[in-house]
Structures are given as structure tokens and as C-alpha cells.
Image: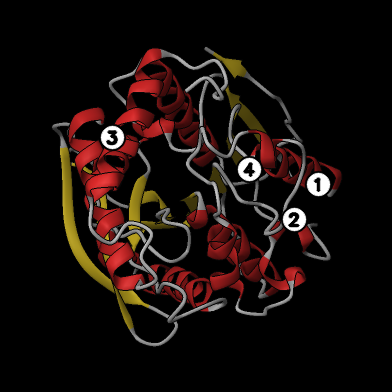
């Protein structure tokens, strides 16, 4: 691992374990997308059982269906057990490179539950459609339809419709950012958008793009973007390449220091700032793209402590505050 940046031991152990497991899982690297999804899910779950803390006590987790772009979609709601009445609510889009991932992954379940408990924000995680069977804009259509359904069923689902936002991790963050653009254009203001390890530019961007690929497991990952775009123009699907960013929901952006996507996420924060969108940017020192999931490591605990604190603060006030742009390097 001499070609890796300086990383804490738990992150190195996680990378080594991921490489060991990947080599033993049938379907890893297969041309069959179903086989690859199965292998990726197995890898994710086995890593989570070793490196991610369990779902905390004090949470109610229930299954529901929300409207999607072509019909109902599965969703999972995370709500503190002692919560009463309508809560600020965030629609959450999981990661998975646009072609994989699910709300059923152990890491997603554990982190959503912990985040909802500590922030006081109800989280509804959506099983959106995946590429290549359903390329852009299918996942964005699902997110927009789910937001509309949450507004319509606010009383039933305990949603404070005046404090409804969106968020996502990795590929899900791209979908969330695109949905926020769509909601702005439709005149449906969101309270907030939380974008975690965001692929803001669906193209090579910045010096980080090539420098940190191995550390984040992204060697040869360009095919993921191609499958998602399926010929769609960057101006439509790539948040950084949108023509107008004015009037968007206030944003929280978390980037990882050693992530190929870091520079694009930082550029998106600067673009929002220039468009007078309130934005908070944090860059997690020592992190690679997936390391926030290593919650047995103090660096990931710091990440989630800060994320929950920022989320609670953002949803406490539903009107836009003055622009706040800050970059925080944390060890």
C-alpha cells in the first residue's frame, strides 16, 4: 500500500479487507450488472459488520412506499422513538455508483438510524431506480415524486412540510443535488440539501480526480458515470454544470480529503456561494471516499458528530440565513 496517501490504521485495515473480500466474491468485476450488484451488496454488508457500529437504541424504523417516477417505490423511515408530532424530514438517497446500492444495506441502515437519532431530523431513505436499466433522469424523477408524496402525506408520515429537505451520499448526493435543482425550477422550495462525498462534476475534475483513485476504490470507475448518463448532456445531469444555481436550497457539503471527487465538491460549494446560496463546506481530514462508514474509527465518529450537528442546526431554521462558507479540516 505504498502508493496510498497517509491514512490512519483503521482506514488502511478497511481498504485491505475490502480488497481481500472483493477477490473472493463471485461477480466482482462481472459484465453482468445483476451479478456485480450482488457482489457489491455482499462486500458492503460484510465490511459493515466489521467496521460500522450497530443501529442505536431509541429509534423506530418502519417500511413504507412513496410515489416514484414510474410508480410506487420502497422507502424506509427512521424516526426517534420519543418524537411527537411532525418532524423536520430529509429524503435520503443512498450511494452505489448509480448502478447499485439499496436501502437494505447494513451500512445505510446503521448510519441513517444514528444520524436521525442524533440530529432529530426524520430520515426517509428511498429505493430509487438504478442504471443501466433506468439511466438519468429516472432516479431524479423518483426523488422529485417522493418529495411531492411526502408533502401530500405530511400528516400521515409525521412530516413538517415547511422543513422538508433532501440529502444523499456519493451517487445519491448527485441525485439529491439534481432534484434540488428541479424543485427550484418547479417553485417547490426545499428547506435544505445535504450532499455527502458528492460527485458534483460527472467528468474528470481537479487534481484530486487521478491522485486518490486507489485509496477510494475508484480505479476504472468511469463506466459508472457513462451508465448513469446514457448520453444525457452534462448540463442536465451534472450539478456543477447546471446553467444557473441561484435560488437553490441552503446546502451542507461534506468532502473527504483523499477522495477523487473532493475538488468537484469544493468547486460546487464555491459555485453555490457565488450564486448567493447559503453553503457550509467541511472537508474531513484523513478520509477517503467510503471511510465515513468506518464508525469504529474516531475519524468517522468525528465526521458523523459534525454532520448531525450541522443537520440539526440547518433544520432548526427553515428560512435562509446569511451565507456561511467554511472549510474545516478535522483529524
Query: Is 285 left, or right, of 303 in this rendering?
Result: right
Query: Residue at the location (28% across, 68% down)?
Result: 35
Q: Earlier in the sequence, mark 1 or mark 4?
A: 4
The residue at which mark 2 appears reads as 240
The secondary element bearing badge 1 is classed as helix
Query: Residue at the location (25% across, 31% down)?
Result: 52
Q: Earlier in the sequence, mark 3 or mark 4?
A: 3
The secondary element bearing badge 2 is classed as helix
Disc ID at residue 261: 4
Q: CA distance from mark 3 to mark 1?
A: 31 Å
Closest to the camera, between mark 2 and mark 3, is 2
Q: Residues within 10 Å of mark 4 (few under 14, many from 20)?
A: many
Q: Confirm whether residue 53 shows in the render.
A: no
Q: Residue furthest bottom?
A: 70
Q: CA distance from mark 3 to mark 4?
A: 25 Å
Q: Residues within 10 Å of mark 1 (few under 14, many from 20)?
A: some
Closest to the camera, between mark 1 and mark 4, is 4
The residue at which mark 3 appears reads as 114
Q: Confirm whether residue 195 shows in the render.
A: yes
Query: Residue at the location (22% across, 45% down)?
Result: 45
Closest to the camera, between mark 3 and mark 4, is 4
Mark 1 and mark 2 in contact? Answer it, CB < 8 Å.
Answer: yes
Where residue 297 appears, as percent x and y from the top left, is 34, 18
The residue at which mark 1 appears reads as 271
Identify which residue, 143 or 88, lies in the foreground: 143
Where residue 253 appears, as percent x and y from the top left, is 61, 39
Q: CA distance from mark 2 to mark 3?
A: 30 Å
Identify which residue, 296 or 322, lies in the foreground: 296
Residue 38 versus residue 317 in the image, above or below:
below
Amino acid at each position: 500500500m505504498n502508493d496510498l496517501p497517509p491514512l490512519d490504521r483503521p482506514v488502511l485495515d478497511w481498504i485491505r479487507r475490502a480488497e481481500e473480500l472483493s477477490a473472493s466474491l463471485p461477480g466482482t468485476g462481472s459484465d453482468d450488472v445483476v451479478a456485480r450488484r450482488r457482489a457489491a451488496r455482499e462486500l458492503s454488508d460484510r465490511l459493515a459488520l466489521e467496521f460500522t457500529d450497530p443501529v442505536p437504541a431509541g429509534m423506530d424504523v418502519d417500511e413504507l412506499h412513496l410515489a416514484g417516477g414510474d410508480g410506487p417505490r420502497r422507502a424506509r423511515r427512521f424516526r426517534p422513538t420519543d418524537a411527537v408530532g411532525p418532524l423536520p424530514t430529509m429524503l435520503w438517497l443512498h450511494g452505489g455508483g448509480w448502478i447499485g446500492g439499496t436501502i437494505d444495506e447494513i451500512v445505510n441502515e446503521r448510519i441513517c438510524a444514528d444520524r436521525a437519532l442524533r440530529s432529530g431530523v426524520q430520515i426517509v431513505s428511498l429505493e430509487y431506480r438504478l442504471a443501466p436499466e433506468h439511466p438519468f433522469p429516472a432516479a431524479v424523477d423518483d426523488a422529485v415524486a417522493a418529495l411531492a408524496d411526502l408533502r401530500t402525506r405530511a400528516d400521515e408520515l409525521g412530516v413538517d412540510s415547511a422543513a422538508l429537505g433532501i440529502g444523499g451520499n456519493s451517487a445519491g448526493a448527485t441525485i439529491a443535488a439534481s432534484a434540488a435543482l428541479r424543485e427550484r425550477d418547479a417553485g417547490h422550495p426545499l428547506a435544505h440539501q445535504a450532499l455527502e462525498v458528492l460527485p458534483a462534476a460527472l467528468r474528470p475534475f481537479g487534481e484530486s480526480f487521478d491522485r486518490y483513485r486507489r485509496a477510494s476504490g475508484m480505479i476504472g470507475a468511469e463506466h459508472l458515470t457513462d451508465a448513469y448518463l446514457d448520453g444525457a448532456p452534462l448540463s442536465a445531469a451534472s450539478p456543477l454544470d447546471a446553467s444557473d444555481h441561484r435560488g437553490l436550497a441552503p446546502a451542507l457539503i461534506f468532502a473527504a480529503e483523499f477522495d477523487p471527487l473532493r475538488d468537484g465538491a469544493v468547486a460546487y460549494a464555491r459555485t453555490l456561494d457565488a450564486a448567493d446560496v447559503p453553503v457550509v463546506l467541511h472537508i474531513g481530514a484523513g478520509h477517503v471516499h467510503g471511510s465515513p462508514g468506518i464508525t469504529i474509527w474516531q475519524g468517522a465518529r468525528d465526521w458523523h458528530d459534525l454532520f448531525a450537528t450541522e443537520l440539526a442546526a440547518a433544520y432548526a431554521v427553515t428560512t435562509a440565513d446569511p451565507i456561511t462558507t467554511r472549510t474545516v479540516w478535522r483529524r
